[in-house]
Image: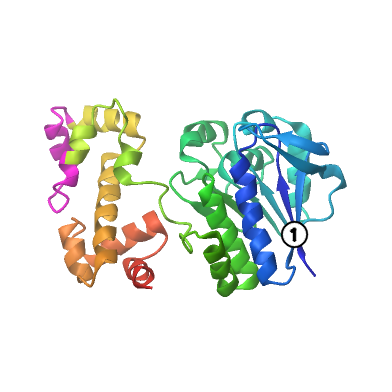
Amino acid sequence: MPRTIGFLIFPDFQILDATGPIAAFEIASRFTHGGYDLKVLAAQAGPVASSAGPNLYAEAMAGAPPLDTLIVAGGDGTRRSAYDPALIDYVRATAATARRVTSVCSGAFLLAAAGLLEGRRATTHWSRTKDFARRFPGVRLEADRIFIKDGPIWTSAGITAGIDLCLALIAEDHGEAVARATAQQLVVYYRRPGGQSQFSALLEIERPEGRFGGLLTWARERLGEPLTVERLAGQAAMSPRNFARAFVQETGLTPARAVERLRVEAARERVEAGPEPIDHIALAAGFGDPERMRRAFVRAFGQPPQALRRAARA
């Protein structure tokens, strides 16, 4: 019996947030001989305009059959849809009966507004994280993750991360072989782990007109050396207290967390590049010992260094 997947859209939704996951499940359905029944849903039946202009035809959500999985699209329209009582009530009611409820990009705002993310781990598109954290302080937001599963609730970052999430859902339903074949048909990487960061450390930490760009570049060139708050503050010609406060205000990270991001990114490149011993990499990247680096990798990528090396070799 096919699993019914509902894709919830609304005016000004991001079209790839819906059509990317639709394509993934459509292809997986071919490999599973009709394993999925796909429904595009909206508050009212008819064409729904995306933020790009083209319409996607939807069925009325009120008449939708029971769903196995609900996938909520993101896009500019979530700024209004997160306040739409009909949409929120539908998401909340569906969560009570569906096996899974998921979101792509800023679709997480609708899940949070429905109360589904309270006390749970979640992610969303990096550009919306500050607004999300302000509006939903009870959610354990992990702003740099590609996707997160917390019980029956899955959330993901923007557009292509929605495809990563759907490949993980397909793997959960039908196994790795079907998910891998789907990825091959889509010509996408199979498959980025949910714990992977959304983008590079320097791009994440730096601000276009921020005062710490040069300092971060300086630190990246000296990762094998001690990079204490006092040393960083001295390089920035600031007192340690003022530096730490200003750094958090500008980047959203403590100096120690920022240095760790730089270190795990540099270490990952070496881990995946070849057979260099893990303990040598840990020392060169400034972790000091392999266990400290392993814990940092799990925090940043959801996997230890050895797992990433095996994936790179494969």
For label 1, the SS is loop
Asked if the stretch drawn in magenta spans residue 260, the answer is no
Say whether residue 283 is left or right of residue 106: left
Picture quadrant where residue 107 is located: top right
Q: Nearer the viewer, residue 208 or 149?
A: 208
The image position of residue 23, as x and y in percent, is 64, 55
In the image, what residue occupies the spot 60% across and 36% down?
A: 75
Picture quadrant where residue 105 is located: top right
Query: Circle 1: is it few (<14), some (14-19), or many (20+) Cα within 10 Å?
Result: some
Residue 117 at least partly seen: no
Say whether residue 287 is left or right of residue 105: left
Q: Residue furthest right?
A: 63
What is the tally of numbered marks visible in this picture? Answer: 1
Q: Which residues are magenta?
A: 218-239
Q: Is residue 112 above or below residue 34?
A: above
Asked if the stretch drawn in magenta spans residue 232, the answer is yes
Picture quadrant where residue 272 is located: bottom left
Q: Is residue 237 above or below residue 122?
A: above
Q: Nearer the viewer, residue 260 or 311?
A: 311
Q: Is residue 146 above or below residue 186?
A: above
Say whether residue 127 is left or right of residue 9: left
Say whether residue 214 is left or right of residue 265: left
Mark 1 — residue?
A: 68
Please identify the quadrant where the C terminus is shown. Answer: bottom left
Colour mapping: rainbow
The image position of residue 28, as x and y in percent, is 65, 65
Please identify the quadrant where the N terminus is shown. Answer: bottom right
In the image, what residue occupies the spot 62% across and 53% down?
A: 21
Q: Amino acid at mark 1?
A: Asp
In the image, what residue occupies the spot 53% across and 54% down?
A: 148
The image position of residue 53, as x and y in percent, is 65, 31
